[in-house]
Amino acid sequence: MAGIALDNSNRIEDSTIIEALVSENLALKKLLKINYDFQSGIEEEVDKQLREEEAQLNKSVIFLGSTHSREEDHRSAHRARSGRMVRISFSPSKPAEEGSQ
């Protein structure tokens, strides 16, 4: 507890101890708030990125569904019978590098 002064009788004044404790308490509360705000900001950014990736994936699925036709069904069935299968795969967008937040 910095800032606590001893008087000539080597006793610490009660008011000095109380002031130091209040000051320390306020400093800790400020640090806790900063930490909470920082954690909340990270959580919000992660949630935002996940929503964006999910929306992009949903757009891709909708696009594929809207271009699908009966003719493609017949071609797919023919490829399956002839051993020529076409595989379509999705990969999520590249995650942000750590430390860039």
Image (cartoon, rainbow, N blue to C red):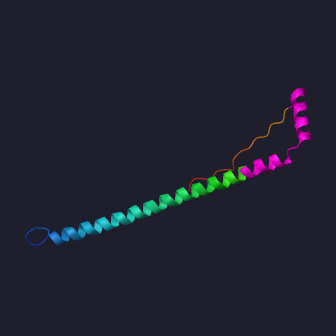
| Residue 6 position within the rendered picture, expressed as x and y whole percent measured from the top left | 14, 70
Residue 39 forms part of the magenta stretch: no
Q: Give the answer, above or below, for where 83 lies relative to 92.
A: above
The quadrant in which residue 15 appears is bottom left
**Bounds of the magenta segment:** 58-84
On the question of residue 52 being in view, the answer is yes
| Residue 58 vs residue 90, the one in the foreground | 58
Residue furthest to the front: 70
In this rendering, the answer to whether 82 lies above or below 88 is: above
At which x and y percent is residue 1?
Answer: 24, 64
The answer to whether 37 appears left or right of 83 in the picture is: left
Is residue 75 in the magenta section?
Answer: yes
Q: Quadrant of residue 83?
A: top right
Helix, strand or loop for the magenta stretch, by majority: helix
| Residue name at image x 21 percent, y 68 percent | 18
Picture quadrant of residue 29: bottom left
| Observer-nearest of 89 and 3 | 89
Q: Position of residue 33 (x, y in %)?
A: 41, 64
Q: Position of residue 70 (x, y in %)?
A: 89, 40
Quadrant into which the C terminus falls: bottom right
**Residue at point 14%, 68% (across, down):** 12
Of all residues, the one furthest to the left in this rendering is 9
Q: Please give the count of numbered marks on the rendered protein.
A: 0
* Residue at x-position 48% and y-position 58%: 39
